[in-house]
Image: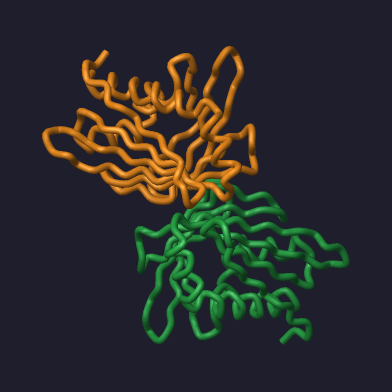
Chain colours: A orange, B green
Amino acid sequence: MTTNTHETEITADPDIPLIRITREFDAPPEKVFRAHTHPEHVVQWLGPRRTEMRIDHYDCRTGGSYRYLHVSDGIEYGFHGCFHEVRPSELIVQTFTFEGEPDGVALEKLNLEDLGDGRTRLTSTSLVDSFEDRDAMMVSGMEEGVREGYERLDELLAG
Amino acid sequence: MTTNTHETEITADPDIPLIRITREFDAPPEKVFRAHTHPEHVVQWLGPRRTEMRIDHYDCRTGGSYRYLHVSDGIEYGFHGCFHEVRPSELIVQTFTFEGEPDGVALEKLNLEDLGDGRTRLTSTSLVDSFEDRDAMMVSGMEEGVREGYERLDELLAG
């Protein structure tokens, strides 16, 4: 376990159907970026602790795509999308669909900001096309999964 | 020229930063779909008449990506994105960036509805993360390009 656990802020935008997540990490942008792009790293932290992650494919480059499963209590939850743009240590723009709701899709932007002293601020936004869908995401257990995932990421980065 | 030119409706959503386009075509969904997915067809109609379209790559399948140029008066305008989902004759979900504004990105959904009698209603939405960017798209000459492109698509479908 790391000793510094930073707060994960998750907010619903008041004007557009978007969720914004901010979180600091005690690691430089290069390392936080690598933890998001290399499937052998991603599989170690993405999602809540109680789930097992199985990667179908994870080709994190501009024009690439991904699909993975979260397995919890023997039930498989599939997720997939494409990578619109991947700028090293700075930006990942991708789409995201939970396969339990195959007509839903979010546009996600991940920004990494170098805070100096080996620290990084991550800002992630998730945009959908209705406030109803956005609000459903907020109450779906997403928050717990994000917070726990970032705690696991802290541990990976400290390792 | 076709004799039936349908109206292209382009509206700005009042509640979210989205543009919605609807247009009917005198061709069945399979044929309208093919005109969107096969680069050798796309190049014949996408964009205003005065532009020449050059395709860098156009891999229209779930998880694929594209990049093309519109050339007008010797100036090249680049566009690229990835295909989140492609469902035959029904749906294309993709991202879209105009390379003149490389940090901007839209999430686009194209739906085709079978109206019977060899007719199709196309509904296309384009979602961005600010009303300012959405309104800028509305006044950028986008409307003229879309209308003229669909007139060219009518001609291709009638051919």
- Can I make out residue A64 in this image? no
Quadrant placement of the N terminus of chain A = top left
Position above or below: B2 against A53? below
Position above or below: B32 against A85? below
Q: Picture quarter containing residue B71?
A: bottom left
Q: Residue at x 68, y 57 (%)?
A: B111
Instruction: Count every numbered label the image shows and give the total.
Output: 0
Quadrant placement of the C terminus of chain A = top left
Q: Residue furthest front?
A: A14
Q: Residue at x 54, y 33 (%)?
A: A79
A113 on left or right of A136: left
Position above or below: A103 against B13? above
Q: Picture quarter containing residue A105?
A: top right
A86 on left or right of B116: left
From the top left corner, tell me how far across and down residue A120 is, in percent: 22, 36
From the viewer's side, name the closer residue of B61 and B11: B11
B115 on left or right of A57: right
Q: Residue furthest right?
A: B117
From the top left corner, tell me how far across and down residue B8 is, in percent: 67, 75
From the viewer's side, name the closer residue of B8 and B135: B135
Q: Residue at x 20, y 30 (%)?
A: A27
Position above or below: B53 against A48? below
From the viewer's side, name the closer residue of A10 and B101: A10
Q: Residue furthest left?
A: A117
- Can I make out residue B10 in this image? yes
Q: Residue at x 39, y 21 (%)?
A: A148
From the top left corner, tell me how far across and down residue B140 is, in percent: 46, 76
From the top left corner, tell me how far across and down residue A15 is, in percent: 47, 52
